[in-house]
Amino acid sequence: MIRRSRAGAALLSLAVAAGLAACSSSGDEAGGDAVTLDYWLWDDNQKASYQACADAFHADNPNITIKISQSAWDVYWQNLTTQVAAGDAPDVWTNQGSYYPQFVTSGQILDLEPYVKADNVDLSQYQAGLAGLFEKDGKRYGLPKDWDTMAVVYNTDHLKAQGLDAAALEDLSWNPTDGGTFEQAIAKATVDNNGKNGLDPAFDKTKVKVYGFLPEWGDGSQGQNGWGNFAAMLGFTYLDKNPWGTQFKYDDPRLAQVIDWYKSLIAKGYSPALDLKSTLARDALLNAGKGAMTITGSWMINSYLGDSAKVKFAFAPLPAGPQGRKSAINGLSDAIWAGTEHKDEAWKWVKFLASSDCQDIVGGNAVVFPAIKTASDKALAAHEGKGRDVRAFIDQATAPNGTFFLPITDHGSEVSKIVQDAIQSAVLGRTDSATALKKANEQVNALFK
Amino acid sequence: MTSSTPHHPARRRDDRRAAWWFLVPVLAGFGVFYGYPAVRGLWYSVTDYTMLNTPSFVGAENYSALMRDGDFWNALKVTAWYVLLNIGSQTLLALAIAALMHRLTRSVVLRATLLLPWLVPNVTVGLLWMWLLDTNLGFLNHLLGTVGIGPVGFLSDASLAMPSIAAINTWSYTGYTALLLYAGMLQIPQYLYESAAIDGAGEWRMFRRVTLPLLRPVLALVLVVSLIGSFQIFDTIAVTTKGDPVGATRAIYFFIYEEAFRFFHLGYAAAAAICLALILGVLTAVQMRLLRASRSDLA
């Protein structure tokens, strides 16, 4: 099969070359051959913004055309890996922290450091730390394109009815022992069939109508949508070093404390039990009025504040834990395939994607927060122009020590499965949290031996 | 079923050669789409292939790792549980429906209606039932709630998730199975029922003494086909539970899929797939033998 397709490709390229030769012999156009670069991304919400970037780029570089392909997150990495394995990968693609290490390890991503040095790309224009996520051993495997942070999203009408307005949610505290004022708010937002809230002595936890807080249990090894943030507020770190650590610390008792706190919410009836949780996503439950609050990321802004939302939502900052308020921050990057035949053209495109020329366009469309700080301000302004309050995300990103990075390591998806299974079995009560996490940590660290 | 004419003229040799030409398209298709991938899969199962590397030979390492992998055994266990639930409920229901169709009504509309769930794509079936069975927003839990029961975590409770998935697929496949069995029942000569009736046998007795024994070859075929199909449970799981909670629905196909296309352990996944093929082969052989599928009592 391979041999045949190679022969086919050879024939095809011969035909193309012959065609091109015919073209160039007849015409005498200056400025090199026309090149089409394949560019991949997964978020359909962002496709239009990057198409606008591609059009602007093509206007400046008429001989380079960008062909954007978008495929859903669930199949994106399968498609990409298959294409890379087949030797037919896109020239440039969007990368994410958990998935890109395997391409680095297998030598499929072009080192951009020489290009960055030659063209003097200013790495300090990006949100602090983002550029470093894609560095390994002095090599650079991508330039930052955007970032996301976490905040609390809540149903405004429901919380108002329980006496909680935006000001009351602005500065909540949290600790793993009694949950602080955050748990008080959750309790107030939980309402049973008789209309009694979680603080009422007559509250019936077996007949809950609206849960105060919806946890995310399918959150892999990172807990980006919940436990990871709380653990960080206790001083937990995932790894010996990040990125590219090899020693995980899931056996940290502080992480077990967070999971135990989550279990206590279930025991009190403030959150649905794991075996009674919905198979549908949390935003579906919030929209149906079955839940009052959850923790979400800035990539969900348009789902919650957009036209498709069935109830009115607003964002509040995460509560502040014993070591302050901390949110996971995650950044995406654009990478060049090491096997591309158009390295220089691909670099031009990546450099453009990572420049304010493109990121201002993306920011102006208010879909994500671009990596360049000034472009992020444009996104904030665009949101405000639409009457959307998204300060919670920006404030958290710019607060000193307000963020922590998600782990970037080899074996990301295996670690994800092991840790998620361990946490779920702890929440289901099959083992206690500390034992489950200790065992998972041993399994995870064994992957690196 | 083949006609056995007592006298036929001696065949010319050319016939066989011609027959091979007629078989070529099928053999070519089989070779390209089954034979070649199977051989390649066998090779991958003894390598450390990850899609991005050049596979190198590792001997039986994948297989011995599989034997030590608790998740693999768990996958086999939950698959066996699923097969038991699914084949059991599906075959019994289908048998009942087929018998009713055979003895009571032969309405074409009814037969067509029975097939409807089977015509719906599996992913749609999965999505449909995921919404219907959802703990918080599902219609079924809403109904249960009005009579004071629940909510029940059909797909999120570890002990209920697999039975729920088995029930979904039973809903989807019973009509088709019933139709196969019904076709088998139509081959049973009518006079047997008439003479049984004259001898004073009731419907139940006729079913047990006439229908079931004479249906055996068809039933065996249906069982073998649905057993293999049942082992391949994948789409319903991929749509509804994705193997959760804590592996309770991580059936063997989903296990193989995750190893191959989530963790990119292609060699390991190939080894698991070879094990599954072996298990299915053994099960099929045992079943065929026990049910004497190739012989009919209708002689």
Image (cartoon, coloured by chain):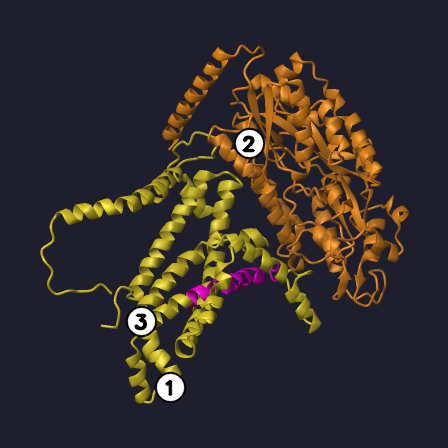
Q: Earlier in the sequence, mark 3 or mark 1?
A: 3
- The answer for how far apart the CA atoms under marks 3 and 1 are is 20 Å
Q: Which chain is assigned yellow?
A: B
Q: Which label sits in the foreground, 2 or 3?
A: 3
Q: To which residue does mark 2 refer? A: A102
Q: Amino acid at mark 1?
A: Gly
Residue B168 inside the magenta-drawn segment: yes
Q: To which residue does mark 3 refer? A: B187
Q: Which chain is assigned orange?
A: A
- The answer for how far apart the CA atoms under marks 2 and 3 are is 59 Å
Above or below, B251 against A48 in this view is: below
Q: To which residue does mark 1 refer? A: B202
Helix, strand or loop for disc 3: loop
Q: Quadrant of the N terminus of chain A?
A: top left
Residue at the spot 33% in from the left edge and 89% down from the top edge = B200
Query: Disc 3, disc 1: CB below 8 Å?
Result: no
